[in-house]
Image (tube, rainbow, N blue to C red):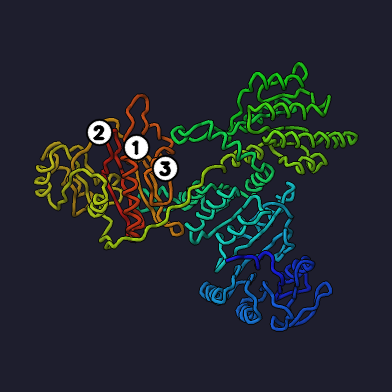
Amino acid sequence: MSLDALFDPRCVAVVGASADPAKWGYWLASGALAGRARRTVHLVNRRGGGLDGVPFVPGLGCLPTVPEQVVVAVPPSQVRPVVVEGLAAGARCFTVITSGGAGPEEERELADLVTARGGRLLGPNCMGVVDTTTELRLSWGDFPAGSVGLVSQSGNLALEIGRLLARAGQGFSRFVSLGNQRDIDAADALDALIAHDATRVVAAYVEDFRDGRRLARTLAAASAAGKPVLMLALGRSEASGRAAASHTGALVSARSVVEAVCRDAGALLLDSAGELVDTAVLLTAAGNRIGGARRDAVRATGSGAAETGGPRPLRVAAVGDSGGQGALAADTLAARGLDVPVLSEATRAAVAAHLPGHGGCGNPVDLAGAGEADLRSYARVIRALLDGGDTDATVLTGYFGDYATANPDQARQECEVARELGEAARRSGRLLVVHTMARDTPALTVLREHGVPVYERIEQAATALAHAARHVGTPRTPPPLPPRTPAGPLPDGSYETVRALLAQRGLAFPAAEFVTTAEEAAAAARRTGYPLVLKAMGLAHKTEAGGVALGIADETALRTAFTRMRASTGAVRYAVEEMVAHPHSVELIAGVRRDPAFGPVAMVGLGGVTAELLADTALALAPLTPPRARDLLLSLRHAPLLTGWRGAPAVDLDAAADALCALTRAAVEHPELTELEVNPLLVHPGGAVALDAHGVLR
């Protein structure tokens, strides 16, 4: 449903308006009045009064025109009566600043009341909404105008982002405070920003993802539409302190799921408001220049990018006023995964033509005083680098922008050079980034006006470049959850039960029998053959508990192991299983964990008893397709072990991918399982076999 009435209402009414600057009602009312040249504004307060020459009316029923949007800033007990009155008056959009009742149930009932009449509700417990392109400011605080659209569940964080954007010469196109998301949620608000032409970069701070799959589809749609999404979310410290019933639970945290969803959808998950603003400033200034560079990198790498770890990194040239600053810039760029390549002979010659004899024309380039001798040297050297084509971006680091501070007579020329720098970047189609020790000088204003991002610290510039380089790619739309096939729930998550479930879906297991006594174990062993494995059932971490004995060679060893295992574990049921070994094999862990927001999430990584120690895992929303499963396998840090390390033959990646697909299908079909795991999954040149499995019932 369209949110036009939220962002550009023809008529807005503020209920709870106040003339007291200490109250929210004052800021909402004064903000609404700032847009009265574009829309009708009514201020409602039953006690009377007025603001800026506009009298307060006692109620919504007294209005001469229908308010498209009603802003509600009254005590919680009065919210529902105001909404009822607004609906009766014809309003269809409500922004509820205060809480909507005594608890979540009352707030849900309030939202149902509005949506049942075809309306929409923002909040409750939100900070409001701003659209600088339609002169709408229904919130507290200052919101500078710009190209960044923000959706946030934190009001103060939005204010911080706004101030940082203003200092960088940027601002908001739209701002939506989500509050408790009883109706309009993050996906709704983001959809509106994607469709908003004036919004060039979308930013979001989300604490509660609600329908995570829907949000993932929205993020992918934004990426496909060329709108970068910069995401902030909580959870970086959660996994370290949380106990889990399986390895999968320990390796799949809420944060890691969000990271995987953002990666696949083409969104950037960042760590702070500062990183978000730095990256947004670069992306709004860069336009399509970063995107073109990344697409060129993908083409240059070729179709085998997945096999080699992805496209080549972004290539960057560094130019410094001094050797020290240039060298530090090069180190900082390289430390963030950017390439600072050796320049071609032709480019080196073009640069050297504009430097004194002792200048450095490699990469980094040392101006060696050329700028002090002639400010236009900056433009000539930068133009040679941009036009040379050896790099995708150029970083100028040091003093430029501050010459007029020490010598005001240089102000005009410095601004002219800044203009030349911006025009050179535009004509080349490549990105120029400036790090300077200056602040708020006229030359920096000119740079920003010409689309050149400016940073106070080199690490800001390097981090923003690195993040921006990651955002271009083909987004993956999250897989739909297939309709559940008729299947009874599993009685338990034991190895015996889970093994049968997965075997039905084509996953290979060693031959095994399940027993309760030593006599039964000996009889089963005669049928299975030696060597074999004895496992105690009912243990999530069998090895740590002494519930696994490997390489049992004969009946005497079997009986000894059985007696010892029963004494140490107390288990009542055991598996007597064929001992499987293959040359050049690799142990993987594969699992599915059901996330409350995103549903089943698949995980694969290096497995066995060191799974949590190595923590080399890759995640994606389940179910998986064979190509997606292969991509996950090849994205692991230890993927060379799978593709043939030091002359070893490659494992059967297709068999490994098929095993992952079977596991994820089983998990999707059985929502009563919160976790499903195979560890280890032994993959080898001839196939893949599951050596153990475990499930956790809801």
Q: Which residue is mark 3?
A: 617
Q: Which residue is mark 2?
A: 582
Q: Is residue 262 left or right of residue 138?
A: left
Q: Residue at x 51, y 74 (%)?
A: 105
Question: In the rendered view of the protein, which quadrant contains the N terminus?
Answer: bottom right
Secondary structure beneath label 1: helix
Q: Nearer the viewer, residue 176 or 456?
A: 176
Could you tell me which residue is drawn at 75 percent across and 75 percent down?
Answer: 42
- x and y percentages locating residue 667 in the rendered image: 34, 54
| The quarter of the displayed image where residue 282 is located | top right
The three-letter amino acid code for the residue at tag 3 is Thr
Given residues 71 and 78, the one toward you in this image is: 71
Circle 3/circle 2 CB separation < 8 Å: no
Q: Tell me the quarter of the image containing the C terminus.
A: bottom left
Answer yes or no: is residue 647 visible.
Answer: yes
Residue situated furthest right in the rendering: 409
Pointer 1 and pointer 3: residues touching (CB < 8 Å)? no
- At x 63%, y 82%, the residue is 88
In the rendering, at what x and y percent does residue 533 appear?
A: 20, 42
Horizontal arrangement in the rendering, residue 172 relative to residue 401 (left or right): left
Which element carries disc 3, helix, strand or loop?
strand
According to the image, label 1 marks what residue?
653
Measured Cα–Cα span from mark 3 to mark 2: 23 Å
Mark 1 to mark 2: distance in Å? 15 Å
Q: Earlier in the sequence, mark 1 or mark 3?
A: 3
